[in-house]
């Protein structure tokens, strides 16, 4: 592990929040496994950025809904650097359906969202836990959502999956202590291309304006804001575990979005 100060796996790191998190680790001189499901070009660009930022990185394709892929991601880190210090479980999917459109969601929609957003995070934690325990320490940070507290978001299935991810975070924190700390960050909304790709630029811009106006801080989170929180929980915060960190600009203490 010459020249590397730590090793992280970041799932769903080909763009958006995952890319910002991976680059954050690299700026700290870490080695990073940049996971992607389909966006190989994006992941390779993130790898290039990580190396330019002073870290090491390797892209690794894998669907976190597949346990075999999760174990392969862990093996990639161990084969390359011999250890795993942090896991940022960022991979997530949704289906954009208005909450009142109950007929717009099928059982298969729920099952697919759970497979990635919840089971994927569990499988990744299980894959990295043995190495972290052997080392005597490690940190897992799940990228969840404010939707898991409020019961609304891009779809009801998405909000429910994030509520389950929050509960998984608490359960893993109990199970994996004392060697491994497990926390989650729960952004209300982060300014990435994710929403615009789902609903179009006009609706995305309108929603961003609404969230910024409702926020006590009168702004929306950037990808770097979320990455900063993940990096703090992963590389600092030695006495923090089982925490669901809200990143909502004060929305959690307003009624502006009700």
Image (cartoon, rainbow, N blue to C red):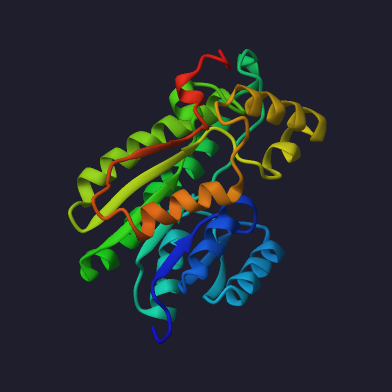
User: To which quarter of the image does residue 102 belong?
Assistant: top right
Furthest-front residue in view? 217
Looking at the picture, tell me which residue is in the foreground, 31 or 44: 31
**x then y, percent, for residue 77:** 43, 72
Q: Residue at x 74, y 40 (%)?
A: 197
Furthest-right residue in view? 202
Residue 186 appears left or right of 154: left
Looking at the picture, tell me which residue is in the foreground, 42 or 124: 42
User: To which quarter of the image does residue 84 belong?
Assistant: bottom left
Rendered view: 249 above or below 57: above
**x then y, percent, for residue 162:** 46, 34
**x then y, percent, for residue 246:** 44, 35
Residue 41 appears left or right of 56: right
Q: Residue at x 40, y 67 (%)?
A: 74
Count of picture labels: 0
Rendered view: 220 above or below 47: above
**x then y, percent, for residue 127:** 35, 60
Rendered view: 199 above or below 240: above
Furthest-bottom residue in view? 2
Looking at the picture, tell me which residue is in the foreground, 172 or 29: 29
Rendered view: 7 above or below 126: below
Residue 151 appears left or right of 128: right
Looking at the picture, tell me which residue is in the foreground, 59 or 147: 147
The C terminus appears in which quarter of the rendering? top right
The N terminus appears in which quarter of the rendering? bottom left
Q: Residue at x 55, y 26 (%)?
A: 216
């Amino acid at each position: 592990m010459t020249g590397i100060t730590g090793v992280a796996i970041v799932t769903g790191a080909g763009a958006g929040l995952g890319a910002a998190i991976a680059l954050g680790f690299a700026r700290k001189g870490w080695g990073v496994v940049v996971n992607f499901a389909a966006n190989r070009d994006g992941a390779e660009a993130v790898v290039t950025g990580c190396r330019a930022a002073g870290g090491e990185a390797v892209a690794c394709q894998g669907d976190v809904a597949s346990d075999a892929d999760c174990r392969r991601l862990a093996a990639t880190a161990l084969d390359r650097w011999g250890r795993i210090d942090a896991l940022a479980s960022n991979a997530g999917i949704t289906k954009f359906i208005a909450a009142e459109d109950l007929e717009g969601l099928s059982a298969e929609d729920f099952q697919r969202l759970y497979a990635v957003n919840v089971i994927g995070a569990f499988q990744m934690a299980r894959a990295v836990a043995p190495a972290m325990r052997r080392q005597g320490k490690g940190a897992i940070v799940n990228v969840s959502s404010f939707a898991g507290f409020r019961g609304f978001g891009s779809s009801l299935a998405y909000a429910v999956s994030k509520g389950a991810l929050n509960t998984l975070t608490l359960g893993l924190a109990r199970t994996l202590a004392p060697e491994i700390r497990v926390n989650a960050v729960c952004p209300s909304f982060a300014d990435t291309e994710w929403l615009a790709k789902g609903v179009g630029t006009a609706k995305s811009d309108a929603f961003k304006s609404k969230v910024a106006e409702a926020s006590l801080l009168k702004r929306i989170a950037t990808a770097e804001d979320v990455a900063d929180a993940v990096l703090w929980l992963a590389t600092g915060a030695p006495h923090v575990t089982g925490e669901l960190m809200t990143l909502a600009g004060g929305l959690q203490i307003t009624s502006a979005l009700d």
